[in-house]
Amino acid sequence: MNKENIYNCLIIGSGPAGYTAAIYASRANLNPIMIEGLEPGGQLTTTTDVENFPGYPEGIMGPEMMLDLKKQAERFGTKIISGMVKSVDFSKEKGGIHKIVSNNDTVYLSKTVIISTGASAKYLGLESEKKYMGFGVSACAVCDGFFFKGEDVVIVGGGDSAAEEAIYLSKLCNKVYLLVRKDKMRASKIMAKRVMENSKIETLFNHETIEILGNESVHSVKVLNNKTNKEITIKASGFFVAIGHKPNTDIFKGQINTDDVGYIITKPDSSLTNLPGVFASGDAQDSIYRQAVTAAGSGCMAALDAERYLSEFE
């Protein structure tokens, strides 16, 4: 095995976590390599305005912000490769070499690996949902709720996440319509109770979305009562989907410990996984916060953890 072909640090995936990990790893002279993934820049490339990331007082477009982070990572020497990873073979030994294979069958060997593959929001699959993505349609109330201050919005979902986001939106918006496909919520009793007692939230049970309507942006939502087959149109400028997220971790199954949903389990107060030299950051391991700033912070943690790990074998 030629040592010249073994990297110190390989980052799988981009986005705030991956790029921040790259910046820190580069500045630590680890000479990292990054394989960007199917969607370079991650979920923020589908977000129009980002106003809650520190350092951008006037806000910034999501794709522009990701380009800034990418340029910063490259400035410090990160080698960024277009493409995605199709398989991995992680070493179970301390100081072992990890094998990563890209979609064009290129094999990369690395002493450490930082997983920053993110998570994908689950959507309803409507054409109109895609059409107005970033123009009234969102999968993150905490990220985008501010843009609908004083307006009427619709949110879809029946679990705790939907309940939490509906309550959050009720503090900003004029009225929140919560569409629940079944005759009751899946949310915990306490969360369901809070929703039902909130005067600004109108819960519509047995209702499903037919189509999102708009011109340049969303102006209303056509819904169906699946018990009576009656259709109604709700005037709303925002449409939020809260039916869950799926972490992009399928290729690591069987090697990395994950929870039932697929989020990578990391050791408390660290980015360490169950395998030595393999670290996880961002939405691939965060099922709670899912914010750009927390993803960036965990990317920093992963790079620092990788640097400390490598220093043990110098």
Image (cartoon, helix red, strand yellow):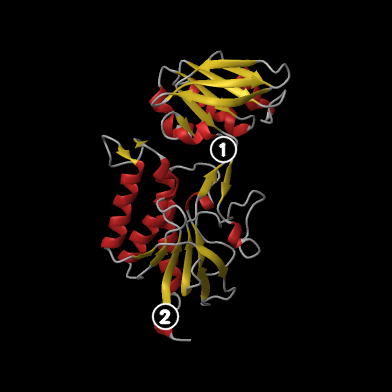
Residue pointed to by mark 1:
123
Instruction: Tell me if mark 2 has few (under 14), some (14-19) or many (20+) residues whose alpha carbon lies within 10 angstroms of its own.
Output: few
Disc on res. 152: none
Disc on res. 5: 2
Question: Which residue does the image show at 56% across and 68% down from the upper left?
Answer: 88
224 is higher (above) or lower (below) than 73: above
42 is higher (above) or lower (below) than 220: below
Image spot of residue 21 (x, y percent): 39, 59
> In this rendering, would 280 be left or right of 232?
left
Q: Earlier in the sequence, mark 1 or mark 2?
A: 2
Which residue is farthest top? 199
Query: How many labels sit on residues?
Result: 2
218 is higher (above) or lower (below) than 142: above
> In this rendering, would 241 be left or right of 17?
right
Instruction: Tell me if mark 1 has few (under 14), some (14-19) or many (20+) residues whose alpha carbon lies within 10 angstroms of its own.
Output: some
Question: Which residue does the image show at 33% across and 59% down from the upper left?
Answer: 23
Q: Which of 140 and 272 lies nearest the eye of the viewer?
A: 140
Q: Nearer the viewer, mark 1 or mark 2?
A: 1
Q: Quadrant of the C terminus?
A: bottom left
Disc 1 residue type (three-letter): Tyr
Residue 74 in view:
yes
Image spot of residue 101 (x, y percent): 52, 70
* Quadrant of the rendered image containing residue 252: bottom right
> In this rendering, would 54 be left or right of 12?
left
Q: Secondary structure at mark 2?
A: helix
Asked if labels 2 and 1 touch by Cβ distance under 8 angstroms, the answer is no
Image spot of residue 67 (x, y percent): 31, 51
